Image (cartoon, grey):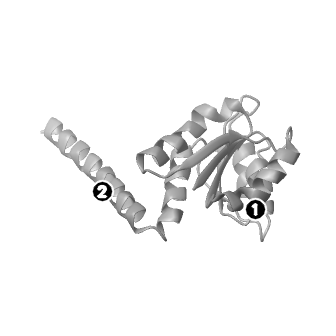
Amino acid sequence: MVAIIMGSDSDLPVMQKAADILTELQVPFEMTIVSAHRTPDRMFQFAKTAHERGIRVIIAGAGGAAHLPGMVAAISPLPVVGVPVKSSNSIDGWDSILSILQMPEGVPVATVALNAARNAGILAAQMIATSDADLLQRIVQFKQSLEKKVLEKAEAMERHLK
């Protein structure tokens, strides 16, 4: 249901977090490398046909100039969630953030924070859950678990301060 793509295998440590949360939420996914600059024909073919293979959301991570999410969004009819990746040739990651965030009108890319592939996975699952009641329930339970963890930490801190 979800395709996770990245410009290089060096992005895998970041993008693996999207795969991990999708696994936790029981959302099927595929993951591969699709470089906008080094394999433009592969990128074009991937973006043009992903919906025909049952993909419903694309998560695209890229560093540096970070053209992958936007180019895929320009070609594919599917929603694209962009993950800016702080790459080795970046000073602070702003190049990736702005390259993904500043899309022209008509070519939207939902953009998460720098290296926030986990949030991209959650957002992709939430998009799919709008028409999948079972997944929606798993997301509700996931959100409840987040709340429970925070409340437990708050309680522990408050006990420690007394």
Kind of element beneath mark 1:
loop
Picture coordinates of residue 159 (x, y %)? 14, 40
Picture coordinates of residue 154 (x, y %)? 23, 46
Please rate how many residues cluster around mark 2, counting C-alpha atoms within 10 Å: few if below 14, some from 14 to 19, many from 20: few
User: Can you say which quadrant of the picture contains the C terminus?
Assistant: top left
Mark 2, residue position? 144
Name which residue type carries label 1.
Ser
At horizontal 81% and vertical 48% (from top left) the residue drawn is 43
Quarter assignment of residue 36: top right
Say which of 124 and 87 sits in front.
Answer: 124
Kind of element beneath mark 2:
helix
Say which of 146 and 124 sits in front.
Answer: 124
Name which residue type carries label 2.
Gln
In 3D space, how far apart are the residues under numbered discs 1 and 2 (Cα atoms)? 34 Å
Q: Residue furthest left?
A: 162
At horizontal 59% and vertical 39% (from top left) the residue drawn is 15
Say which of 38 and 87 sits in front.
Answer: 38
Mark 1, residue position? 76
| Residue 70 visible in the snapshot | no
User: Can you say which quadrant of the picture contains the N terminus?
Assistant: bottom right
Observer-side mark, 1 or 2, equals 1
At horizontal 52% and vertical 57% (from top left) the residue drawn is 123
| Residue 55 visible in the snapshot | yes
Picture coordinates of residue 2 (x, y %)? 59, 53
At horizontal 25% and vertical 51% (from top left) the residue drawn is 148
Please rate how many residues cluster around mark 1, counting C-alpha atoms within 10 Å: few if below 14, some from 14 to 19, many from 20: many
Q: Is residue 59 left or right of residue 25?
A: right
Pick whichever of labels 1 and 2 is earlier in the sequence: 1
Q: Is residue 92 left or right of residue 120?
A: right
Residue 158 vertical placement versus 46 (above, below): above
Residue 128 vertical placement versus 120 (above, below): below
